[in-house]
Amino acid sequence: MAQVKLENVWKKYGDVEAVKDLSIQCKDREFLCLLGPSGCGKSSTLRMIAGLEHITDGKIYMDEVVVNDVDPYKRDIAMVFENYALYPHKKVYENLAYPLRVQKRSQAEIDQRVKRAAEILEIGGLLDRWPRQLSGGQKQRVAIGRAIVRDPKVFLLDEPISHLDAKLRTHMRGELKRLHRDLDATMIYVTHDQLEAMTMADRIAVMNFGVLQQLGTPDEVFNHPRNKFVAGFLGDPPINFIPCVLHRNGGYQLVHDQFKLQLPDPVIRKLVRKDLPDGMAVDLGLRPESFELFTSQTAGSEMTGKVYVTEPLGEDIIIDISLGKERMKARTVIGQSWQIDAPIFMKVRYERVHLFDSKTEESLLA
Amino acid sequence: MPDEEKHGTSSPGGLPPRARKGRKASTRPVGQELSILHRKKFGMSFYAWILLPVIILLAAITLYPFFWMIVKSLYHVATRPGQHDEWVGLKNYIGLFKDGLFLNGWWIQLRYVVISLVVEFVLGFTLALFLNNLKRTANIITTIILIPMMIAPVAVGFLHMYLFNSSFGWYHWFLKSVGLLSGGSILGDMEWAMAAIIIADVWEWTPFMALIFLAGLKKVPLDQLEAAKCDGAPPVKRFFDVVLPNMTSVIVIAVLIRFMDIMRYIDTIFVMTTGGPAGATKTVSYYLFDVAFRYFDIGRGAAHGFVLLLVTIIIAQVFVTVMNKSRKGMAR
Amino acid sequence: MTVDVGAAPKKRQSSKAMEPDTIIKRRTPLGQAITVVVLTLWIVWTLAPLLITALGSIKTTREAFATPPYGDWKGVANIFKFSPTMVHFERLFSQQGFGAYIWHGLVASVGSAAIAVTMGTLGAYGLSRGKFKREGDISFWIISTRMAPAVVVIVPLYYIFKNLGMLSTLAGLIVAYTTFNLSFSIWLIKGFFDDLPVEIEEAAFVDGDSHWAVFRKIAVPLAAPGIVASFVLCVLFSWNDFLFAAVIGGHSAKTVPVGITELRTTVEVLWGPINSATIILIIPMIALGILIRKYLIQGLTMGAVRE
């Protein structure tokens, strides 16, 4: 197994800067996820790590060795492609065996490795089939199997489950996480699905427009996002942003034409700077789970809105609330009945509050 | 010669790329933008290397004759040993445009092309519509229908020469029996001779049009048709509003290829009428054969060929443009 | 021929309703009947000349020339009244030397096809995968070559070959055929390579294959149907060719099409042998055409239209 380090890596296609000054370190046996919207540079990064793309600038290390000009094959990596890239003219067994045949291993060894991989992925019964006879999920497992047989230093996975149907994806998330444990391998995983990243990764590297936004554990990026982008990208339904004005009245007060929130001490303690100017434009970030909701006025409820629409999800319910010009989503357990256009009273859970500088979009809380 | 982007190296102090014609010279080294599969060994990528011998071969057997032709078209070429080629400049070309047979040849060729195309288009399309109806028998029927396309044009020529023969030809017999033909000979008649050539062409190539249109019909998006049905459009309107527009590129391709082939082949004319009677079927392509291999006026022939080629190339350009558009459409 | 738009709605209706996977199928009996009639008529017209020729090849000349008086429709059945004879076929081989012609045709077409497809596959792969700035120009050059009228091409070819002493040789004919077969092959096979996702080649590359191994083990096997189709079509175009064989093949490299034209002299036209030779000429090609039926339209439109 190995650690992978990117040091000031740039990737340019002509004038287009796909990856800008990226520095990431993936620890040995870590499951690192590159997360971001399409076009953010995550696939380019993965391909550079694989050696399929030239590195415009910067260095990539594998186990302290610079691998910039090393062929993919010599880097001892294995890649699982987004569309599986199985060899259509070879049966499943031969697809799995291919990397080993190129390495000129003995038939006995090939057989043993192929069978082992097939067992881990539960595709033993498919060894005699042709790729065209397989379902999407089966093809994907064969693609993973092809990577496993190589026993590489690093596994690189490029959105491997994005083309599977929803149920299968849910299932595969668990399987892949388990696989990571069983193989005890270093894995770098590219996806645009924040749920996949949250559930599977040890650490997540959030990227946007080629720039690394934040690198941290799922807890870190979810609960302590460094900027609006990260906060907005993780979480479903996404975080609500409400533009307010910061008012210094001895303490800190958030002023909005629909409400006024006085920030309590625990929040103030988390502020990165204490010298925030009065009248500063800030964005209040409230995740849907940050509210307590009431049908009637209660003590301590700071906001009053109107129910726009409700989305029952079985156990939970998502309520779209209109607050003046704003619209927010709040999530709560099913219990009370919410009427459309009825007033709704919200209490903010201050331990879940996020605050961002409206101009720089950076988080004002640590 | 294949002309790959020249990249600077990514090492420090890398050389700036050479300025290409019409491109700004950049002093900053450009990073390699293509994947590693395109890396260069000895100056070119793998793909350029395997293309190289092929390009050389192709250049030798196509470009060299082409330039030969252009050069010779400016001379009066020697036909007897001892004679020398004589420079005449554009005289051959001017002669061409003064030549009644040349100009008339275009006219005849045009008639041939237009009538053939129209007939083959209509018949082919109709056939395609009916073939589209078939399910189980589709394969066998289409296979039978495509047989004429496999047959050598010479053979088609002889087939029809036989059929149009005044004494024992079954077409002749048929036409006389239904009263369409009053005169004695088909291939000897100025009007009928061209008709015979066209009929032979239609027999051989309508299946081509039919199969292309069939493929095009099957590609018409079903949901557009269903949307039109829901909107209440009657079948004929659906045909013109949905089917036809979705088949434009296919139609253009079919027409272009047939046009090119009619310019290309002179086999049927050679066999059936040899340009007669009295030059009634002497298309401009056929006339070239006479000029070059009967009269042996090679300089003229080269000029003649060049003009013909020019027309062909223009059509080819149109073909490529349409095909690229159609390719993008079909990739959806 | 005019298309009867009045009757169109019914048959158009049934044909549109017959799109594959249509949920509602309305097959009107009338539409079906018209379909059968039209297609039958067309097939009859398609096959009739072939039948007449086939019969003519095994009839004596006198029997072949016998047509009933004009208007005697029942007499048409007489076409089937004859006693078969192989005289014409025998004559072709013993007197006219068609054995040699068939051999020349085979060698020239297969030889040229082999060269064209081998080089064509290499060139097609290079063009398809390599990102060349001039790819458009090269493609255009290739297709112009394919579309150039044969008459135009043979003029320079004749004189160049004459100077090289390549006239009247099989080798010369093979080279002549390669002028159009090579471009055609490159163009057609490139289309097949274009359809293969690069990902598969990248996967093989990551697994350790060299460029050449990827080409050999992945690209070529997967494009095999196209390569075969190209080969067959090259054979078809060469075998069927008349002009090149006549002008370049000269005396010693005559092929069947040329041989057939020689059966028509200024003195007489030997219809019997002509019919027999025609049969020999067309049967193999019909068989080949049926063989690659699946790729025929793609091949003949040079990849522009797929089925």
Image (tube, rainbow, N blue to C red):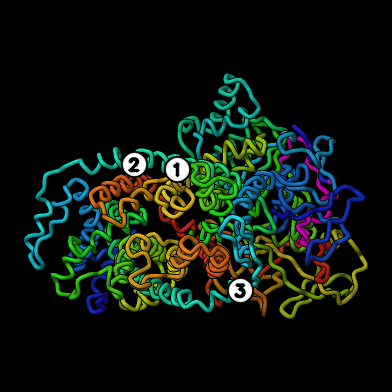
Q: Is residue C93 above or below residue C302?
A: above
Cα distance in 3D space between marks 2 and 1? 12 Å
Element carrying mark 2: helix
> Which is more foreground, mark 2 or mark 3?
3
Q: Which residue is mark 1?
A: C252
First-in-chain label (2 vs 1): 2
Cα distance in 3D space between marks 2 and 3? 44 Å
Number of callouts? 3
Element carrying mark 1: loop
Q: Is residue C228 above or below residue A354?
A: above
Q: Amino acid at mark 2?
A: Phe
Q: Name the one closer to the observer, A352 or C150.
A: C150
Q: Which residue is mark 3?
A: B91
Mark 1: few/some/many CA within 10 Å (<14, 14-19, 20+): some
Question: Do marks 2 and 1 share a subunit?
Answer: yes
* Contact, mark 3 vs mark 1 (Cβ under 8 Å): no
Based on the displayed image, in which of its 4 quarters is residue C39 positioned? bottom left
Name the chain under label 2: C
The boundaries of the magenta stretch are: A7-33
Cα distance in 3D space between marks 3 and 1? 37 Å
Q: Name the one closer to the observer, B93 or A356.
A: B93
Q: Is residue C14 left or right of residue C213?
A: left
Name the residue at 65% across, 64% down.
A292
Name the chain under label 1: C
Name the residue at 83% across, 61% down.
B19
Q: Is residue A341 above or below residue A198?
A: below
